[in-house]
Image (spheres, rainbow, N blue to C red):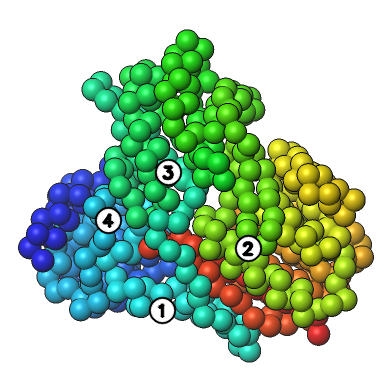
Amino acid sequence: MVEFCGNVLKYFKMNRIKKLQKNVDNKILTVKHIGSRGEGVSNLTTEINHKENEYTFFIPFTLPDEIVVIKPQLITSEGVRADLIEIKSPSPKRIDPICMHFYQCGGCLLQHWNFKEYLCWKMNKISFPILKISPTTNIKPIKTSSIRSRRHAKLKAKKNKYNTIIGFNEYRSKFITKIEKCIIIDSELEKFINFVESPLNQLLNVGDEIDIHVNLLDNGVDLLIDGIHRIDYHKLNNFIKAISTTTVIRFHRTLEDDTKELLFTKDLSCLSNKSFSSITFPPPGGFLQATLEGENAILDSIMQVLNENKKIKLICELFCGSGTITLPLLKKKYQIHAFEIDKESLKAVDIASRKEGFGNRVTTMMRDLKNFPLTSDELVKYDAIIVDPPRSGSNLQFSNIAISNVPTIISISCNVNTFTRDSKKLIENNYELKWVQPIDQFLFSAHVELVAFFQLK
């Protein structure tokens, strides 16, 4: 524990956003529970900035019932954010994290917690708010992904005077932690990260900071870089020569107008799902389900609903992306109307459906569903609706779904708060939330996915 506390001091002593005075005293408190963001939460009546009050403290990398020494750093409307300085009394549920970058990298928050307790917390995070609005809903056991199964990552890179650092931002910081090994991402992506540091160092100018999007497809790595639109073609050609010897199969850069410029390609950029005999063609930097296991868990849940409702023929898919769900459904001979705001994603659906001979069974339509949702009159013709909105949910769209009287609704969400907000509209309009399937494809983070089945009463 002495060694751990030394690491804590090393990695948490500094915080780059300091709204409180530097001479604010350290506090000793007992952690009560883990909050929705994966941080330890505690209440303490104390003085901060000459004001005595009962404050709520948020402390990352702590566990329930631990007695800790903390350094207050920032007051927000929610409470006080603090750094962990020392653990006076560790929890018996604390374990050694398995990643060398834990406590520095902001990608994982909960590797230090007994896995059974961690999964129980994720189940409760889903169950409590859902059962509050629908007490009879069946919350199924959580399905988890394996380590080293993440096939998409967004990395940060910055060139300083001496070298280029590639990695992830530290927790609640813009400081980049160099990543050499990662237990979350696929080993092919890890190899690429370690290789590309030197070519990027030759490509970038001192002070350049870029975003790197890597998707692991069937034949290799699909690479998109933001922030290099001003780099000249001579430098780019040298970079391309370097990455052409790796598993990179396609390379784009984002231009100032947000279009993607293709700079290199050497193989088919496709992504197949053997379990459902489907294939998609994601656009550069396109959204993928984080893991194949997570994708299969989502598809299994959808297929269960559809298989139990034989009358379903015509399906409305909202926020369809590049066809992760669309193509497996077309394989099952459903008719699909697919809606999405991103033109390149819809193009990917069209390409995949034509290649598979499904072009006559899918209609793709570009639509800003958040601001211009389908109306209840437009929805009424469908046998089922599948909706997979972004984290912010789709308040207006759910309002219209709720009065559409479409008998079967399948909702996919990565944010239980916006899910429950939107789901209330369905429940208040004679829909029953039959079951929810939690899916953990974001290991050791606070995020959890879910698939939910609503049926009109």
Report which residue position mark 1 lands on: 120
Mark 4, secondary structure of its residue: loop
Label 4 or label 2, whichever comes before in sequence order:
4
Report which residue position mark 3 lands on: 189
Q: Residues within 10 Å of mark 3 (few under 14, many from 20)?
A: many
Q: CA distance from mark 1 to mark 4?
A: 22 Å
Label 1 or label 4, whichever comes before in sequence order:
4
Q: Residues within 10 Å of mark 4 (few under 14, many from 20)?
A: some
Label 3 or label 1, whichever comes before in sequence order:
1
The residue that appears at 83% across and 49% down in the rendered structure is: 357
Name the amino acid type tagged 1. Answer: Cys
Residue 106's spot in the image, x, y percent?
34, 51
Q: CA distance from mark 2 to mark 1?
A: 28 Å
Residue 112's spot in the image, x, y percent?
27, 66
Q: Are marks 4 and 2 in contact (CB under 8 Å)?
A: no
Q: Are marks 2 and 1 in contact (CB under 8 Å)?
A: no
Q: Is residue 443 visible?
A: yes
- Along the viewing direction, whichever of 97 and 238 lies nearer the viewer: 238
Residue 251 sits in which quadrant?
A: top right
Report which residue position mark 2 lands on: 275
Mark 2, secondary structure of its residue: loop
